[in-house]
Amino acid sequence: CPTCALTRGAACGVATARCGRGLSCRAPPGEPRPLHALTRGRGACMPLPENTTPGVEATDAKGSAAPETVSPESAEMTQEQLLGSSHLMAPSGDDLPILWNAISNYQSAKALEVAEATTGKRPCQRELYSVLERLAQEQQKAGDRIYTFYLPNCSKDGFYYSKQCETSLDGEAGLCWCVYPWNGKKIPGSVEVRGDPGCHQYFH
């Protein structure tokens, strides 16, 4: 049943049916490329964290009332959380499920005015929200088709992972490069490759 909700522990991704109530499609713990895992259907339906708010989930098509308060934990949204909501799966015929999932999650969080995620203390999250704002605007353009784009890969503390990659929806691996975790700037002399750029060599 392609439209039935998936059960706990079931494999999921951007092109699968949504997870059941109270579950969210997430990349495996420790997965270095959560976005890549979700695009390949290597996620799993897991219970939602207790501190997840209905507004941040944005799972109900009817809409959910925003909570009175937003905890710091729910405000610290990572790239995985923004891109991994199984309940925002696009129709199977949609070419841009990842991008639109991210935008839908972003707009939901923005509606809650999650200022904590956009403070100067979290440079990667701030850039991520800025990029999603731009993509949300581009989505509204008639006939706009985006197949390659960049979303900052942020750690849970709001800084950058040293390895950053493009997201490609045309089946070809995107370019990857190395950055400084504290500001996201590309490391001078580092290469751009479709694979592992070996970022660890710059931090020993």
Image: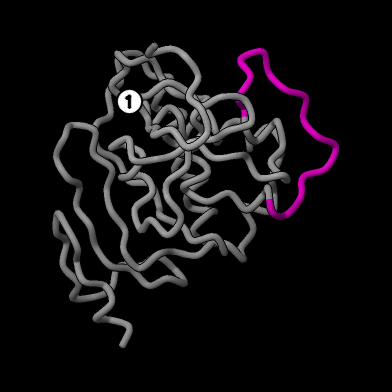
Question: Eyeballing the image, is 149 above or below 161?
Answer: above
View extreme (right): residue: 68
In the depicted view, which residue is nearer to us: 43 or 179? 43
Indicate left or right for 50 with 161 as reference: right
Residue at the image position 53 percent from the left and 54 percent from the top: 125
Q: Position of residue 35 (x, y in %)?
A: 36, 44
| Magenta run includes residue 16 | no
Q: Residues within 10 Å of mark 1 (few under 14, many from 20)?
A: some
| Quadrant location, the N terminus | top left
In the depicted view, which residue is nearer to us: 157 or 136? 157
Indicate left or right for 36 with 9 as reference: left
Instruction: Please tell me whether mark 1 sits on a helix, a strand or a loop.
Output: loop
Occupied quadrant, residue 49: top right
| Quadrant location, the C terminus | bottom left
Count of marks, rendered view = 1
View extreme (bottom): residue: 204
Q: Position of residue 17 (x, y in %)?
A: 42, 21
In the depicted view, which residue is nearer to us: 119 or 174? 174
The kind of secondary structure the magenta stretch mainly shows is: loop
Question: Eyeballing the image, is 190 above or below 192?
Answer: below
* Region in magenta: 58-73
Q: Which residue is mark 1?
A: 96
Disc 1 marks which amino acid? Leu
Indicate left or right for 112 with 141 as reference: right
Residue at the image position 27 percent from the left and 48 percent from the top: 166
Occupied quadrant, residue 13: top left
